Image (cartoon, rainbow, N blue to C red):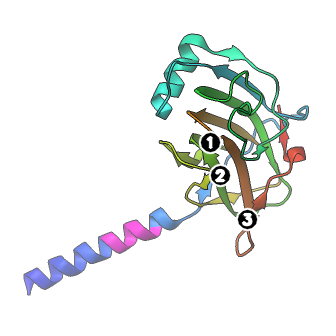
Amino acid sequence: MGKIITAALALAVMLGANMVAAAPLKLTPANPQPKPKPGLTVRYAYPSDVKTLSQARSALKRIGEPGPMLTGLDYSVTAIGEKALTSKRSERVAADIRGFVRFDAPGIYTIDFMTNDGVEATVGGQVVGRFDGRQTCQETFATEVEVPKAGWYPLHVLYFQRTKTACLHMRSGLKGKRVTWMPNKAFGH
């Protein structure tokens, strides 16, 4: 009888933990609300090689330099040899992207990113996209977030591109709707 009660309690704890983990991440809006200019700021580093987010972060600390502003986060797959984002190179690029993203209505949203290669994205104080490796242009795991009110939310993206092609997109959609590309007008700095 004691084993059954112990097993039932363990199951209840596991289910409760899963229910908590499944709750949407609550985003914190910028306070005060900014009146940003269009686009996002970016710093680049051009290490001899980059295979992980840790290597990208380290390169940016050591040799980061300001780059031309990004219009948003909708950068299609490049052809081999085309520059990654607004950087000087097509390969072995690390980027530290900062600014704000605007949600026009409160609610529960699904957010994901398409990336080639690694990305770690934070919106409103929560990590909403992460992939630490190399891949062709593919989605990160979708993350459910709670947007408590319409407005601007702080955005920080760490990104790296190793070899061949590159891409970086942010997508979102209200719960129950399809995720779509975030338009450039949704981003500011």
Query: SS for tag 1?
Result: strand
Q: Name the mark on residue 179.
A: 3
- On screen, residue 78 above or below 162: below
Amino acid on which the number 1 mark rests in the picture: Thr
Q: Quadrant of residue 80?
A: top right
Residue range in magenta is 14-19
Amino acid on which the number 2 mark rests in the picture: Met
Query: SS for tag 2?
Result: strand
Say whether residue 125 is visible: no
As for residue 104 lying within the magenta part, the answer is no
Give the x, y percent position of residue 182: 80, 53
Mark 2 = which residue?
A: 114
Cα separation, mark 2 vs mark 3, equals: 12 Å
Q: From the viewer's perspective, is 142 left or right of 68?
A: left
Q: Residues within 10 Å of mark 3 (few under 14, many from 20)?
A: some
Give the x, y percent position of residue 105: 83, 60
Which mark is nearer the camera, 2 or 3?
Answer: 2
Q: Which quadrant, please, contains the C terminus?
A: top right
Q: Which quadrant, please, contains the N terminus?
A: bottom left
Query: Closest to the observer: 108 or 3?
Result: 108
Q: Name the mark on residue 122.
A: 1
Query: SS for tag 3?
Result: loop
Amino acid on which the number 3 mark rests in the picture: Val
What residue do we see at 31% from left, 70% from top?
13
Q: From the viewer's perspective, is 130 left or right of 18?
A: right
What residue do we see at 64% from left, 56% from top?
112
